[in-house]
Image (cartoon, rainbow, N blue to C red):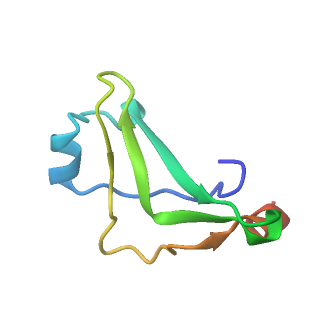
Amino acid sequence: GVFFPDYRPVLDDATAARLGLHDAHDALVLVIVTVGPDISAAYGNLFAPVVVNTRTGAAEQVVLSGQDLPLRAPLVAAAAGR
């Protein structure tokens, strides 16, 4: 939420069922960050987050289909937009 406050990925029904997610409040969405030699070369993968069911601990990296989300969203640009 700090770097990408408007990030609201939508899971398909099959993924939600596989993770046992019946309530959106039980989902924790984690963005994988690749860090380069300095912060200007750090990117978040918004296209394939890790989704955790906080109630059961089930987790999976999910490739989001049908959403125009970047594989490499720069953290510096995201921080500047806050």
Is 16 rendered above or below residue 40? above
Q: Nearer the viewer, residue 24 or 77?
A: 77
Across and down, in percent, residue 20 comes to 20, 34
Residue 12 can be seen, yes or no: yes
For the point 60% across and 57% down, which residue is it? 33
Q: Quadrant of residue 68?
A: bottom left
Across and down, in percent, residue 81 comes to 80, 67
For the point 62% across and 71% down, which residue is it? 73
Horizontally, residue 33 falls left or right of residue 53, namely right
Across and down, in percent, residue 40 comes to 81, 70
For the C terminus, the quadrant is bottom right
For the point 41% across and 32% down, which residue is it? 25
Horizontally, residue 26 falls left or right of residue 19, namely right
Is 1 rendered above or below residue 67? above
* Residue found at the far front of this picture: 37
Is 1 rendered above or below residue 20? below
For the point 15% across and 52% down, which residue is it? 14
Q: Quadrant of residue 44?
A: bottom right
